[in-house]
Amino acid sequence: MPVVYADAVFLENLAVDYILLVACGRIAGVPARRWRAALAAAVGAVYALVSVLVSRPVLTSLAVKAAVGLLMVVVVFGFDRRLMRLAVVFFAVSAAFAGAVMAACLVAGRSVDLTSGVSFGTLLLSFAVFYGLFTAVFRAVGRHRVRGEIRTLTVTYRGRQVKIPALDDTGNGLTEPVSGLPVTVCSLEAVAPLLDPEVLTILRDHPDPAEAVEALGEKEIYSFFLVPYRAVGVKGGFLPAFRPDSVRVGSREKTTLIAIDAGGLAAGAGYCAVTAA
């Protein structure tokens, strides 16, 4: 009977779950806060350790595994309206990774019984291959679905910073009419790490942009304003916007305002912002 080391089980599951949750966020285009991903990974690691030590069939049942997986997704992304889609992506990523581990074991001539433990080196190699293939596939699909290229924006505002996957859309000409500055449209969840809880509450509770900006103006410390826009199939409207302290694409500074789309911009497309190329 193989010897199981509790610390090894916990640490291996902690590392793997963390990587899978971050990968899930990247693939779904929903940025995950690293500390929340670490907390969710700890939940998964504790479950894995308990299921090994207690060794009860009910703990390893499909229902319990699904419940724990869903809890981990909630810990990372909260009760987002896209929760079920994020859960499906997480389970798909986990299944694909398990398949990669089993393939690596077969290539190495080892047993594919994952319950007996897999070396950490095998896990890392499997994930590197798996993540590389997933990234290549999603980038290839993305090039056929959108006009432009997906880049990572590093946005800084009021001492906070967040990285946002954004589509450089060659057909985007949105500008703020008074200043003439270009406008980047981001989903509310993408910029959430930059905003105080009271600001998020106002934006979520006021679906009408004018009412949201008016409510924010009453706080007298947030400089939000309205940006008019028009799009294909849409008569037009307004979006609440603010001027960030800085926006960078790699090492290049980008001058742009940030407008907020509370409707879940490009859900599942691999990006959560649209900017001018």
Image: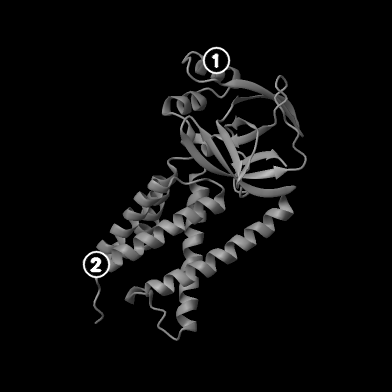
List the residue tagged with mark 1. Answer: 214
Identify the residue at horizontal 54%, vertical 34% (top origin). Answer: 188
Q: Nearer the viewer, residue 97 or 220?
A: 220
Identify the residue at horizontal 45%, vertical 26% (top origin). Answer: 201
Of all residues shown, which one is farthest toward the left? 54
Quarter of the rendering occupied by the N terminus? bottom left
In the picture, measured across the screen, residue 119 lies left or right of residue 23, that is left
> Circle 2 sits in a helix, a strand or a loop, which is it?
helix
Please say if 47 is above or below 180: below
Q: Nearer the viewer, residue 104 or 113?
A: 104
Residue type (three-letter) at the residue carrying disc 2: Ala
In the picture, measured across the screen, residue 141 lies left or right of residue 212, that is right
Please say if 136 is above or below 193: below
List the residue tagged with mark 2. Answer: 6
> Circle 1 sits in a helix, a strand or a loop, which is it?
helix
Of all residues shown, which one is farthest toward the bottom? 109
Identify the residue at horizontal 70%, vertical 24% (top origin). Answer: 176
- Residue 213, visible in the rendered structure: yes
**Mark carried by residue 43:** none
Residue count near mark 1 (Cα–Cα under 10 Å), binned few <14, some 14–19, many ≥20? some
How far across and how far down the image is residue 260, in percent? 59, 31
Q: CA distance from mark 2 to mark 1?
A: 55 Å
Please say if 165 is above or below 65: above
Identify the residue at horizontal 48%, vertical 67% (top origin). Answer: 127
- Residue 264, visible in the rendered structure: no
Residue type (three-letter) at the residue carrying disc 1: Glu
In the picture, measured across the screen, residue 223 lies left or right of residue 185, that is left
Query: Which picture quadrant has residue 133?
Result: bottom right
Could you tell which of marks 2 and 1 lies nearer the N-terminus? Answer: 2
How far across and how far down the image is residue 105, in percent? 45, 80
Q: How is the image coloured?
A: one colour
Residue count near mark 2 (Cα–Cα under 10 Å), binned few <14, some 14–19, many ≥20? few
